[in-house]
Amino acid sequence: MIGIILAGGSGTRFWPKSRELLPKQLIKIAGSKTMIQSTVERLLSTIPIKNIYVVTHEFHAYETCRQLEEFNFSPSNLIAEPIARNTAPALALASLFLKEKHFNEVLGVFPADHVIDDIGKFDQTLKEAEGTALKDYLVTLGVQPTRPETGYGYIKRGEAIEGCSNSFIVSEFVEKPNIEKAKTFLETKEYFWNCGIFFWKTSKILAEFKSHMPQTLKNIESAIPCLQKQKGPYPYLALNETGKDIYDSLEKESIDYGIMEKSNQVAVIAADMPWNDVGSWVALSDLEENDAEGNVLSKEVVAIDCKNSIIQGNDRLIAAVGTEDLIIVDTPDALLVCPKDKAQDVKKIVETLKEKGKPQAKFPSTVNKPWGSYTILEDSPGQLVKRLEVLPGAKLSLQMHNHRYEQWLVVRGTAEVQLEDKTFLLEKNQSTFIPQGSKHRLGNPGEEPLTIIEVQLGDKIDEDDIVRYKDDFGRENSK
C-alpha cells in the first residue's frame, strides 16, 4: 500500500497555539509528538516510510520535512501546494504524480490531524480496506457513533459486499445532522461517522476523476511536469510559476463532493477502532487525563474550585478560581478565554484578527525558518525586538531593507557578518549596526547554535521589507 497524508490546515481551530504558519498538524496536541509525526508513526507498522507521501501547503513544507526527519522521510516524497484548493485537487495532484510507478496499487489517504489509539485495530482495518479497494471500490472508513454528534458527516451502509470483511455498499452520504437526526442515527446502528480516510487503486481514482472532474484532471495533468525539487537541505517538490498559475485557477472542491458522492462504486468499512478528529480544544477532554473535577490542566496551572475546564499554557503560571466549562489557552503573545460550548467559534476570532491585520492570526511568537528560528520579544510602532537562533553552519540570505536599520547583539556563539564588501566575526557580548539600504548577511560558522538579539527600527517593519540577493534555500526576491 502507498500512503498519502493530507496535511492541510489554516491554524484556526486550535488558535492561539496554532497559527496560519503553524497549523495543528505541526504542533503537539496530545502526547509527546506533533500530530503529523504521530500519523507517520501510526502508519509505519503497515506502510514503509519510502511509500509514504505528504501533500501540504508550501508554507509548511520545510517544517514538515524537518519534523519527519527522525523517520528517515524523503523530502522528495513531499508535494507542496502553492494554494489550498481542498482535498480533490490535492489528491488528483498526488495520484497523477504516483501514476507511473504505482498505477495498480492501492493508495491509502490519511488526514494528518487524527488520533487513533488502538494500532492493532487500525492495522487490521487497513488490511480489510486494501482488500476491498483491490476489487475496484472506492473505500471510505466509517466509525460507529458513540454519541449523537452533530459536527460530523455520516454514511449509511447498504448491503454487505461478498468476500470483503466488514465492507458494505454505501447507501447514502448524510450532511451534518441536527441533534434529533443524530440521535436516530445512533439508535439504528446503520450509520457511521465519516472519518475522511480513503482507499482506492491509483487507476480507479484517476478513472473517477476523468468521469466526474475531467477539467480538474486535465489541468493538473498539465501541471505535473512543472513539479521541481527545491533548493536547500530539504529538496521537496513544488510547482514552478507556470504550474502555480495552473493550480491557482482550479476550483475548490472536496473529494467527498467531487467524487465519492457521485460514484456508484463506493464502499464503507465498519472500522472498530477508537478515533478522534481533534476538531477543537474540547477534544482534549477525551485525549488527555482529566482531574477529579473534570479539568484538563497543563503543568504550570493552579486551579481552585474549577470544574470541567481546559486550561493550557507553557512556562508562565496560570491561576484560575471558580471556572466551569471554560477554555483558557495562554501563549507568549495571545490569550484565549472561551466557553466550551463555543469552541467551534474560535475560528471567528482568527477571521477577525485577519481583518484587522493582526500578526497573531498568521505568525506564532516563535517562527521556524530554514536557517533556525526567531522569537518576537517586543513589538511596538517603529520598533521590533527579536531573538534569532541560527543553526550551526546556516546562513540567512544576503539581503537589504529599504525602510529600517538593525542592531545585532551576540548572546551566544560566534556570528559571521557580511556588511557590503566587508566580512567579520562577532563574539559573545559584541554588537554591530546595519544601516538602512545596506546589503548584509548573518551566518553561524560555529558548531553550536548562535543566539542574536536583533533590534529593528524604522518607518516600516515587516517581512515585506526584504530584498534578497542570494539565498541557500531558493528564496531570492521572495519573503
Image: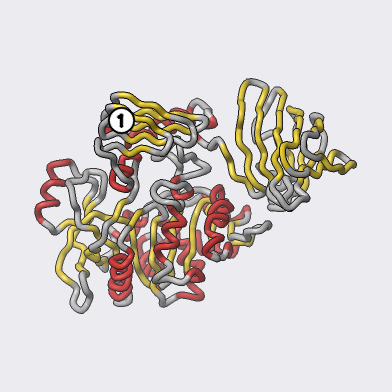
Position of residue 66 measured from the top left corner of the image (x, y, whole percent): 57, 55
Q: Residue at coordinates 61% horizontally, 25% vertically from top-left?
A: 379
Side of 62 where 303 appears, left or right: left
Looking at the image, can residue 215 be seen?
A: no
The single residue placed furthest to the top in the displayed view is 381
Measured along the vertical axis of the image, is residue 381 above or below residue 187? above
Q: Nearer the viewer, residue 240 or 308?
A: 308
What residue type is disc 1 on? Leu
Q: How is the image coloured?
A: secondary structure
Q: Residue at coordinates 45% horizontally, 66% vertically from top-left?
A: 95
Measured along the vertical axis of the image, is residue 170 above or below residue 253? below
Q: Nearer the viewer, residue 138 or 438?
A: 438
Side of 351 where 276 appears, left or right: left
Side of 351 where 416 appears, left or right: right
Side of 74 where 427 appears, left or right: right
Instruction: Identify the image quadrant of the C terminus.
Output: top right
Q: Which residue is mark 1?
A: 326
Q: How many marks?
A: 1
Position of residue 239 measured from the top left corner of the image (x, y, whole percent): 59, 57
Looking at the image, can residue 357 be seen?
A: yes
Circle 1: element type: strand
Measured along the vertical axis of the image, is residue 282 above or below residue 238? above
The single residue placed furthest to the right in the displayed view is 421
Position of residue 48 measured from the top left corner of the image (x, y, whole percent): 46, 72
Dot 1 crowding, Cα within 10 Å, few <14, some 14–19, many 20+: many
Position of residue 12 measured from the top left corner of the image (x, y, whole percent): 42, 39
Q: Residue at coordinates 56% horizontally, 53% vertically from top-left?
A: 61
